[in-house]
Image (cartoon, grey):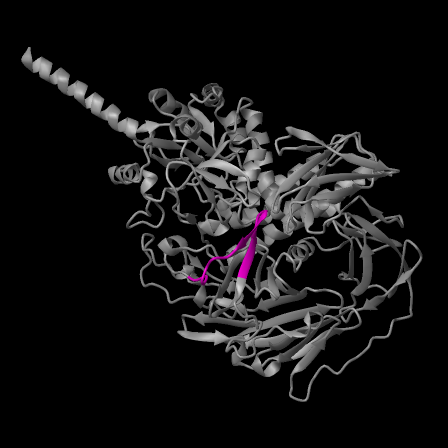
Amino acid sequence: MMRHTIICLAVLLTVVVRESFAQQHYFIDGYHGGKYGHYPAGYTGYIVEQLQLNPFWKINLEIEPETWDVARVEEPQAYAALKKIFANQSDAGRIEYVNPGYGQSYLYTSSGESMIRQLSYGIQKVKEHFPEAVFTTYSSEEPCFTSALPQVLLSFGFKYASLKNPNTCWGGYTRAFGGELVAWQGPDGSRLPAVTRYKSEALLEKSTWQTTAWNNSPEYIQSALAAGIKQPVGMCLQDAGWRVGPWLKERGRYETWRNYIGHVADSQHTTVWKLSQEDIQVSLVWGSQVLQRIAQQVRKAENKLAAAEKYAAINTLLHQQSWPQHALDTAWKSLLLSQHHDCWIVPYNNDHTGDTWISKVKRWTDMTLKVSDLLLHQQGTPGKQLRVLNTTAYPRNEWIVIPGYKGPLLKLTDSKGRQVPVYRQQDSSLIFKASVPSMGYSSYSVEETTKDIAHSKTDRKLTNGRYRIETDLYRMEIDPARGGAITSLRAKKMKNKELVDIKHPRGFNELRGYFYKDAVWRSSMDNAATVNITEDNQAQTVVEIKGAIGGHPFTQWITMTNGNKRIDMRVKIDWQGEPGIGAPQVAHFKPEDRYKSFYNDSFKLQVLFPLNLSEQQLSKDAPYDVTESQLSNTFFNTWDSIKNNVILHWADVTDGKNGLALLTDHTTSYVHGKQYPLGFTLQYAGTALWGRNYRVDGPTDVQYAIVPHTGNWATGGVSNEAAQWCEPLLIATVKDNKSYSLLSLEDNRWEVPALMMDGNDLLIRIYNAAGDDRERTLYISGIADNAMLEQLNGQPLGNLTMRQQASKTAIRLAIPRFGIRTIRLKNIKVQ
């Protein structure tokens, strides 16, 4: 009897202790992956089975939305069973969908509009399968974070977010900050309750992919409790395909993020965190040729689709055409899949058919470009009429090239009968001056002519052997003896400011990097180059520089156009064999070693721009944000010292009086420091993630640009220049000779990243890229029943004041800097 009593008491004490321990900590479990990443056949059935076997278990899902199309067909019974469990979307429910992103994008690698479409298309697809789905918390197993998320998530109806990714930190992690709960503040001022990587949540020893929150170890729990976190939470969204069941078995209390943040976490003592993009400490194999190509393909498709959708909206309104929803859905979904984080971090991985992420991205972006070209009417050569499209929200007066044109010389007249200057380039293409209104187009009549406009020739070569190139804005000198480096760049309208630091040992537009197989630094300035003027007319001058770096031939092109603040550049390197470029490689790569050669940008091949600017301050754009950098330099070489050195569209350096912005045609890393010039990563070739050899397998071909300006990035109009870089004037083939402008903005620091139809309504997305928060006017060439603000999930926020005059409408509204707003114009009619 006594023995039985003792046993019962021991069991009771064990249960009490276990329950007591469980009440001290919580765990976020679930699954990550999907159709394209990883989701083996029969896995839906496994998830359902584990939920049935473990009634205490709750899960959080980050599954690619298209996965359920497959599950519905291949596992109908398990699919139906999961839907039944999922139907309970109350706070007490057992399943929460925490990332409906269509392509599970990193987000920081693409545009702000792509971030919105990732969520809008993903939510739409998830609700197709789970109509009861409620999207309350954003969370990701990978570092799929960007600083502007709060306002976007709130506009979609999310209430909370998590900034943890404890078990998949290969691509990085957020900075450790705060305690149990913070108010995550975005750049526009929006605030969202969020769980962070706690200040007490360390990076795991002997790991390069985990933090201490991955398994709720006693050490992790004790460190959190000691830091005043009364209800600590850990997390692991398991890879779909793992057959572990509940990650911690019965140790700890499993929760959905929805219930934990809403009912468990301390919401009374939150700290405001004005999270900077540099608090998102991420890194990929920047400079590798495979990642470079993927980023270029994604950027090209992203830019083209944004323009095509706007033009489709204009055509639908003007010509009462059917809105091409199916075509646009196809293009957007393909683009969103090409932004999948796995494309960027494991590009060489392949499925059972051998289809790699590389080939998937090419296929997806090709589809987006094909649809976009159809919508832009970019087929064939110009007939008797051509149209120049401007999909930005401000008028433009620029030179534009008819590429690949091999026909006779043309005479162009605008819609008012005025002849515009046309020049034949040396490659037989034509260049002419186009004047195009905002968000619209100008049309030109085309006639053949034999009368050529005389070119003004200038002797570009100086007595010292250098070449001098001059436009109405700049005077540039190039030195063949220094490998074609730019030795002087004076900005005429910036008080003739010399922008090149002539005292710096590095060259302006120099290529430089460490070739570790040869154990030597190489530079484009090591050998003399040849300089040729390939175009030289009143419109533009193009310089071609041919040189070699370490025996590898390269060509650089510099294009300076009259009236254009931007100086366009391009470099192509024809690699001979397979060079090794970057920091010296370790003898035996181990994933858990914190030192990684591919992290070290200081050894990679770079394009450099030493600037004659003192006390330099660097700023860089991010999706719907600009970060004023706090980094003393951009360099690191270990997993536990990652810095956010990502250039999305541009990085800008200023001394407050003058500045220069660097633009790139793809997302990559930039370089800069107190004693190091501005530049960007051009090439890495060597060992990287999981010991994979990231080699070169063809030429490297990259476009970039520089924009000198007065003041800082905001006063210098850098955002406008980037918008023009992303959405250049385009030529379409048409049969009329009309000009048209759909809308314009009072403040040219605002942008219109998206324009689309919804039935008879026009939706306009506005982004305040660089302006203040004062009320401004939007002008529409049309009449609408009313104008209203609405959230990204379609919920109305209230009507806007409209003032109609004849066939025009003026709408007033205020937007904070970095804020986005969506305007719905009901039943709009245009003339």
Which residue, as the protein is rendered here, is positioned at the far bottom? 463
Give the vertical position of 148 relative to 70 (above or below): below
Between 80 and 57, the one nearer to me in the picture: 57
Quadrant in the picture for residue 532: bottom right
Image side of residue 392 versus residue 186, left or right:
right
Which residue, as the protein is rendered here, is positioned at the far top? 1
Image side of residue 570 versus residue 680, left or right:
right
Between 39 and 831, the one nearer to me in the picture: 831
Please give the name of the residue rendered at 39% of the width and 30% of the height, measured from the top-left corner: 265
Q: Is residue 88 magenta?
A: no
Q: How many marks?
A: 0
Q: Quadrant of the N terminus?
A: top left
Percent across and percent down for residue 166 are 37, 42
Percent across and percent down for residue 77 are 47, 20
Please give the name of the residue rendered at 44% of the width and 25% of the height, measured from the top-left corner: 95
Which residue, as the protein is rendered here, is positioned at the far right? 417
Quadrant in the picture for residue 610: bottom right
Which residue, as the protein is rendered here, is positioned at the far left? 2
Between 791 and 269, the one nearer to me in the picture: 269
Percent across and percent down for residue 315 are 80, 41
Percent across and percent down for residue 409 are 86, 66
Give the vertical position of 437 relative to 226 (above or below): below
Please give the name of the residue rendered at 67% of the width and 37% of the height, measured from the top-left corner: 822
Residue 702 visible in the current orientation: yes
Image side of residue 493 versus residue 577, left or right:
right
Q: Quadrant of the C terminus?
A: top right
> In this picture, which residue range is highlighted in magenta?
618-635
